[in-house]
Amino acid sequence: MISRMTVVSLALAALLPLSAQAQHAQHAKHEWTYAGATGPAKWGAIKSDYVTCKTGHQQSPIDIHTRTTTKADLDPIVFEYQPSPLKIIDNGHTVQVNYAPGSGMAIGGVRHELLQFHFHTPSEERINGKQYPLGLHLVHRNADNKLAVVALLFKLGKENPALTNIFNNLPKEADVEQTVEGVTIDTMQILPPTQGYYNFPGSLTTPPCSEEANWFVLKTPVDMSKAQLAQFHKLYKHNARPVQHLNGRVVKESK
């Protein structure tokens, strides 16, 4: 004879996988995805606001071929990131960290405020055809409302301490920003020691794919461990747009 306690325990156990399914169902409500009928090849047809995903001529990401870049005396990027409380959200497409005001970068004397950063796996940017396990996009906006995106590439290697506070506090539910009490992040610690970069005009890599972004892809990848990548893969295993045609754009490379 099955006891009342056993019945209750079985019922609770049955609900556990349903909670994960419910979260995936919540993700499924989003009108665009990374696969199938609402995947990247179809974004431009989902609605008129997304048509640039199909018709644009300066789309991102791209595959950067170093033999064809134009080497130039580009202004260095001056990073001015401050520690920030961890405000994190699973927005149904990626894990995003919303940054407190007061941090940013300057290039050529123009300051850009850091708004947020988010992750893509594998990396959206490629270098000579090579795709990395993870990419990070730091999204900035200047006083003229122009976007500047700094992309970092992660390679498998040592554990990255700068990612620990983020990946140990990944959201447990979608579409709800969580402020993690007592946890701060220091984005300066994520950056590579050398900060040469590739620069080109491009777009948002997600709908509406607006061609309004100035891209800075840092040349030096940084380490992350297999365990850290596995942590991220518990939420997302593939959320990267395929590379887009260059269409005559010049990719500049800092010397």
Image (cartoon, helix red, strand yellow):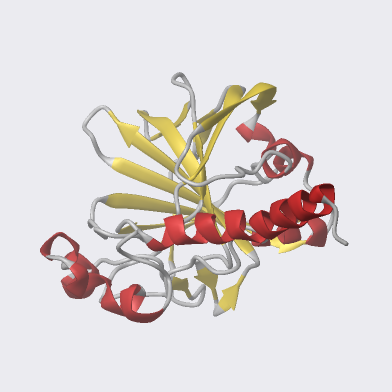
Q: Quadrant of the N terminus?
A: bottom right
Q: Position of residue 80 (x, y in %)?
A: 53, 26
**What residue is rendered at 26% in x and 75% in y?**
248
Q: In terms of depth relative to the viewer, which is nearer, 181 or 217? A: 181
Which of the 4 quarters of the picture holds residue 71?
bottom left
Q: Measured from the top left, where is residue 124 in percent x and y?
A: 49, 66
Rendered residue at 65%/29% (across/down): 185
**Left or right: where does residue 236 sit relative to residue 250?**
right
Q: How many marks?
A: 0
- 75 or 19, nearer to the observer: 19
User: Residue 251: horizontal and vertical position, in percent?
Assistant: 38, 65
Q: Name the one closer to the observer, 108 or 28.
A: 28
Of residues 203 and 221, the one drawn nearer to the viewer in this rendering? 203
> Is residue 158 visible to us here?
yes
**In this picture, is 160 found above or below 56?**
above
Q: Residue furthest front?
A: 1
Looking at the image, residue 133 sits to the left or right of residue 230; the answer is left
On screen, residue 225 versus residue 127, left or right, reads right
Q: Residue at x 77, y 54 (%)?
A: 7
**Residue ranking furthest to the right:** 1
- Residue at image position (85%, 53%) is 3
Let me know if residue 159 appears in the view: no
Q: x, y (%) of residue 166?
A: 67, 39
